[in-house]
Image: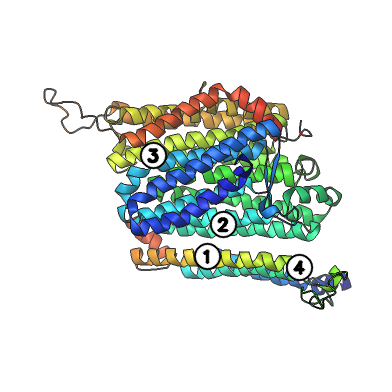
Amino acid sequence: MSLQYPALIVVVPLLSALVISIAGWVNKRWCFPITVAALAVAAYSSVGLLFRVLDEGVIVYKLGGWDPPMGIAYYVDHLNGLVLAVVSIVALLNAIASKKSIEQEFPEKIGPFYTLYVLMVTGLLGIVVTGDAFNLYVLLEIAALTGYGLIAMGGGRGPLSALNYLYMGTIGACFYLLGVGYLYIMTGSLNMVDIAGILPDLYQSKAVMAAFIICMVGVWIKMAFFPLHAWLPNAYTHAPSASSSLIAPLVTKVMIYVMIRLILTIFTPEFSFNILAVSKPIVWLSVIAIFMGAILALKERNLKKMLTYIIIAEVGYMVGGAWLGNRVGMTGAILHIANDALMTLCVFLAVGNIVYKVKGAEFEDLQGLFRKMPFTMGAFIIGAISMIGVPPTCGFFSKWYLISGAIQAGHYGFMVALLFSSLVNVVLFFRVFEICFYEPFSDHHGHGHDRHPEPMDEAPVTMLVPLFIVAAILVLVGLYTGDIVNHIIEFAIPKGLV
Amino acid sequence: MADLISIIVAKYNYWIYITLMMIGLYAMIAKNNLVKKIVGMNIFQTAIILFYVSIGVKKGATIPILEHGHGGHGHHVVHAADYVNPLPHVLMLTAIVVGVATLGVALALAIRVYNQYNTLEEDEILAQIREE
């Protein structure tokens, strides 16, 4: 059984999509249990796979028994073992948490929603597990196409935002495909490890450089790296809460993983950092991304939109960290993939609970929430302080690695940007806390005697429990950061990178 | 000058795909109508498909089906140089499917947008959003 984990991760959600769409016609109540069961199998397999990788090292799974480079192989090493576990756990928790909000927002579309949901998770897990550059493109498009559908389901401005996302997303994926085409011309192979073996003789070739840069630009569009970010805020804001709390934590992070895979595996660090000599400008770009993300977040008066701009700043953290060109920065970037996915999930689930109860995330809607929804806000605080970077939550530790990496690389601009963004996050989140805490509903102001407190109106338990689990994971991951770094990330980065 | 001409003539497939790609990109950026943008997107994707197909070509090669494969004596040597490279073509079958799916989703979204705003012109839609 455990030998088949890499295939199960992708196959089970894929087949369950078919079953769910049939179940949606027969009886809508079956959709949810099937979804959770399929995602639970995927999560169980990926966690099992991570432990197998810790024991045995890299696992190569040949699909259909065909040997690479002819057949498609799934490679699981420490890097994607970690990302797989994070992606599948986030997807599972969000599926459980968002059940009620789906029933509230579009009760008639439960079947299609869950079908797209598991397909999207299939795509994301496939991107992470695959060892074939073209296979990655196909799965990229599976994740993207289902993502457009999930975003457009919200109604309102959803379809328009999804269409704008589609234009950008397609350009991004096409650029990646083009880059793979150049690599194929030069190496005649699509298998990542095989390409990496052939490339060193071709490092001086202009076509290889073009391939690298085109792939990078494509991936950057997909992850909303600053000048290419325009699609993200609207798409994530106008998506229904159940979709945005799946897409916001995962899509950008998985694309960061693809970037790191390109840097570390397909092109070696030697090529990416030394021969190409573009790391300095890219880190400066990420500095701008962090500044702009933070500044644009300040002007938003909608909680969800504010969080989307924070995501853009966080993308800047990870791109910058990966391109610092040293081991500490790369460790920070990889650790931040996991941490940022979890803390984004935490705050977006909290926002989902708020939207479920007060029907909006504008700042005016948030007044008096601490009394109304104390548990949701409690978890939101943990997510927020993790985003700010307060120990012992996990956000602190990855930021610590990133800043150490910046100092080690002598790139003080990046360090300043990180600190600036943390300070802005303090302002952003404490402004939200203030609104939620100090300004009660002003229906009866002036009449002290009949001012009875607003009754508590908390989100249902099925939404709260996953939220608490995520908040607890944030602290636990923070406390066990040392183990994660020493046992997983240490092996994820090639020895050559110091 | 002779160099330049030889670069253009010898590698004309790349020039065609780049030109097509830029036409598509231009339409996506500059056109105001959402469907024209979708058409531009499709041209963009098709350009890359043509690029892939063109890199499989070899001079004087035939289609990649084994000659005399059914003759009973199946143990003859296959000269790869005699056949065009089928792999890019196979890859592009998948890419075409992806392109069609993307086009379908894009048109479906455009219909949703049209039902909502009664127009497909981007500036009119933005004006309506601003009024809300």
Crowdedness near tag 4: few (<14), some (14–19) or many (≥20) residues, C-alpha within 10 Å: some
Residue type at the position of mark 1: Ala
Quadrant placement of the N terminus of chain A: top right
Residue type at the position of mark 2: Glu
Indicate which disc residue A141 carries.
2
Secondary structure, mark 3, is: helix
How far is mark 3 from mark 4, CA to CA?
48 Å
How far is mark 4 from mark 1, CA to CA?
24 Å
Secondary structure, mark 2, is: helix
Residue A319's spot in the image, x, y percent? 63, 40
Q: Are marks 3 and 4 on the same chain?
A: no
> Left or right: where does residue A471 sit relative to residue A492?
left
Indicate which disc residue A97 carries.
3
Secondary structure, mark 4, is: helix
Q: Which residue is mark 1?
A: B101
Contact (Cβ within 8 Å) of mark 2 with mark 1: yes
Indicate which disc residue A350 carries.
none
Q: Are marks 1 and 3 on the same chain?
A: no
